[in-house]
Amino acid sequence: MIATFASLLVFQALGEGLSYALSLPIPGPVIGMVLLLAYLMIRPAMVDKLAPTAMGLLRHLSLLFVPAGVGIMVHARLIAAEWLPISMALLASVVVSIAVTAAVVRALQK
């Protein structure tokens, strides 16, 4: 389990490194996930090795939301002062997500 967890961390570190080195506007963990996906597509046998570790992390996923919740509470005044732009950004991201999902589903159904 430690070796597979280390593998996941390596992909996250690679993503962070690429994001920082190339000054990309994409978060490092997202790049790391794309790299991991590409690796798993090349070596599908690794899926079975990584699955138990990934499932263990998913079981404790709710713990990862604690820092975000604390950040919201700590910055409540700032959020209250900027509620309109935050709300507009959230609304726009939901609309774009729904549109992209619909386009992908339509493309996959053809």
Image (spheres, rainbow, N blue to C red):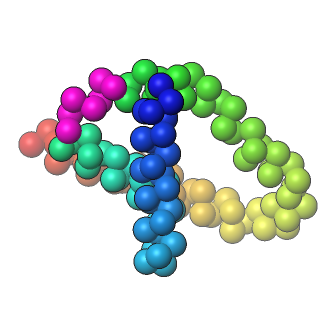
Say which of 104 and 62 sits in front.
Answer: 62
Q: Residue at 26% of width from left, 40% of height from top? A: 40
Q: Position of residue 105 (x, y in %)?
A: 24, 42
Residue 25 visible in the shown view: no
Residue at screen point 69% across, 63% down: 86
- Relative to residue 55, is residue 91 depicted above or below? below
Residue 29 is situated, as x and y percent measured from the top left of the image, at 49, 54
Left or right of 50 on screen, residue 107: left
Q: Residue at x 45, y 33 (%)?
A: 3
Residue 63 can be seen, yes or no: yes
Q: Position of residue 82 (x, y in %)?
A: 78, 67
Report the magenta residues as a range.
43-49
**Please, what is the dominant secondary structure of the magenta stretch?**
helix
Q: Is residue 83 above or below residue 63?
A: below
In the image, is residue 76 above or below residue 66?
A: below
Q: Residue furthest left?
A: 110
